[in-house]
Image (cartoon, helix red, strand yellow):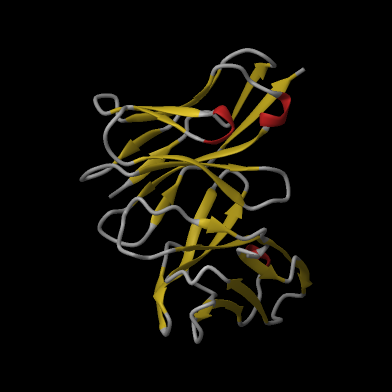
């Protein structure tokens, strides 16, 4: 069965420092991976996705994610964090055999001024 | 385009009461989904639909029913609300052209409190 794990409930980082939010996955076929962000009292917004090709995927708001097949990871990164990046981040994998998306439990990112 | 909208934004129910949550999308998407979000549990799929007139169970379907009578609307019903159904409910849609890399578009959520 497909699954996604986000091992950190919360990540704290100082403004201007690089940030990483971790995600590992388990799929039986090709992985189709997504990152979404949720700001307080809002719905989820798409950030980026990995389909195939380059292992470094660039997305919205300066975020990027690194796909690592051998480590089955899809970590979200940003070179320089902003206070406005503080939000809840979800990793997800598409279950290729069905129409479903499987979400991780979320990681709360707090960027400190 | 309004995207995905949800009605109501917030509701308080007493145990045993019923209600319907409405999701509407104006993007002509085929696929629609209902999720619930609970602290520490992420998003869990309740029901989904791959087209008008079709629905299917997700991960946590018990206590909920759905209908997709029109392509643009996806209704989630609670026949007899229980405190365990206190949650934030999100609707999402995706184009549904059988491409596994499609992204989902989410509504703003409905916060439900069952007393």
On the image, the x and y values in percent for residue B60 come to 47, 64
Q: Residue furthest left?
A: A29
Closer to the camera in the image, A15 or A5: A15
Up/down of A17 relative to B108, above or below: above
Q: Quadrant of residue B31?
A: bottom left
The percent coordinates of residue A92 (x first, y second) are 43, 44
**Image quadrant in which the N terminus of chain B is located:** bottom right
Q: Quadrant of the C terminus of chain B?
A: bottom right
Report whether B109 appears left or right of B97. right
| Residue shown at 26% from the left, 28% from the top | A69
Q: Is residue A85 above or below residue B5?
A: above
Query: Residue A105 location in percent, x, y?
Result: 52, 42
Q: Residue at x 43, y 82 (%)?
A: B52
Q: Is residue B48 above or below residue B37?
A: below
Residue A67 place in picture, x, y as percent: 34, 28
Give the residue at x 48% y 56%. Answer: B104
- Total number of numbered discs in the rendering: 0
The residue at 50%/24% (across/down) is A77
Quarter of the rendering containing residue A101: bottom left
């Amino acid at each position: 069965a497909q699954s996604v794990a986000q091992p950190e409930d919360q990540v704290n980082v100082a403004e201007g420092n690089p940030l990483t939010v971790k995600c590992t996955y388990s799929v039986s076929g090709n992985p189709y991976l997504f990152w979404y962000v949720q700001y307080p009292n809002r719905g989820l917004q798409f950030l980026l996705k990995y389909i195939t090709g380059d292992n470094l995927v660039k997305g919205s708001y300066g975020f990027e994610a690194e796909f690592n097949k051998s480590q089955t990871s899809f970590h979200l990164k940003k070179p320089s964090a902003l206070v406005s990046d503080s939000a809840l981040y979800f990793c997800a994998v598409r279950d290729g055999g069905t129409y479903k998306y499987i979400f991780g439990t979320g990681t709360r990112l707090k960027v400190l001024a | 385009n309004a995207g995905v909208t949800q009605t109501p934004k917030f509701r308080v129910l007493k145990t045993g009461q019923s209600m319907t949550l409405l999701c509407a999308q104006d993007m002509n998407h085929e696929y629609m989904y209902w999720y619930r979000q609970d602290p520490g549990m992420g998003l869990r799929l309740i029901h989904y639909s791959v087209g008008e007139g079709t629905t299917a169970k997700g991960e946590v379907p018990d206590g909920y029913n759905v209908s997709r009578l029109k392509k643009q609307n996806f209704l989630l019903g609670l026949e007899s609300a229980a405190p365990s159904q206190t949650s934030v409910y999100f609707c999402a849609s995706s184009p549904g052209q059988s491409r596994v890399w499609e992204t989902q578009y989410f509504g703003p959520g409905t916060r439900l409190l069952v007393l």
